[in-house]
Image (cartoon, grey):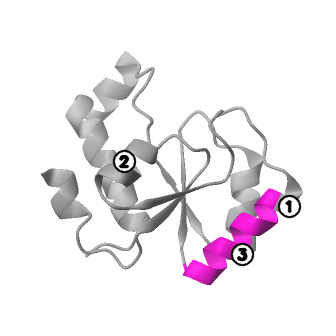
Amino acid sequence: AEFEAGLSSCVHREFVTSHAAYGYLALAYDLEQVPVAGLSPDAEPSPQRLASIADRINDLGLGAILVEPVLSGSYEQVLAAETGASIYTIHPMDGITQAELDEHGDYFGLMRDNLKSLRAAMECS
């Protein structure tokens, strides 16, 4: 209910991610995930893919890229510089460490922080 309410009134229904890990989230809340790379978090996008994503960010007027804490690679920085987009953190929720849970309070705190990042990225009111 918290995600549904939090994502109900957004300027954008699209969100850019470092890789295609959030399809379930997009499907559940009628959003469109725009992944820079494929399913593998280790995949490096080609220069053509980066140019295509930069065009998409600009065409849609998106102002953010969502990046996993352990994946912030140089290509996100390049995209941000090229498009003027901000970078926000989103946690994939697999492999959560005790330190991350402590930092966010608990699992639900981490999910709420993900919601904050999504809301900022999609300009939700």
Residue for point 76% across, 48% down: 74
Amino acid marked by disc 1: Gln
- Element carrying mark 2: helix
Q: Disc count in the image?
A: 3
Measured from the top left, where is residue 119 in percent x and y? 34, 64
- Left/right placement of residue 18 relative to residue 50 reads left
> How much space separates mark 2 and mark 3, taking CA atoms?
24 Å
Q: Earlier in the sequence, mark 1 or mark 3?
A: 1
Q: Is residue 4 magenta?
A: no
Q: Name the disc covering residue 48, or none.
A: 1
Give the residue pinned by disc 3: 55
Q: Main secondary structure of the magenta part?
A: helix
Please state if 8 lies on the left or on the right of 1 as rendered: right
Pointer 3: residues within 10 angstroms few (<14), some, or many (20+)?
Answer: some
Q: Residues within 10 Å of mark 2 (few under 14, many from 20)?
A: few
* Residue picked out by circle 2: 25
**Can residue 33 be seen in the rendering of this structure?**
yes
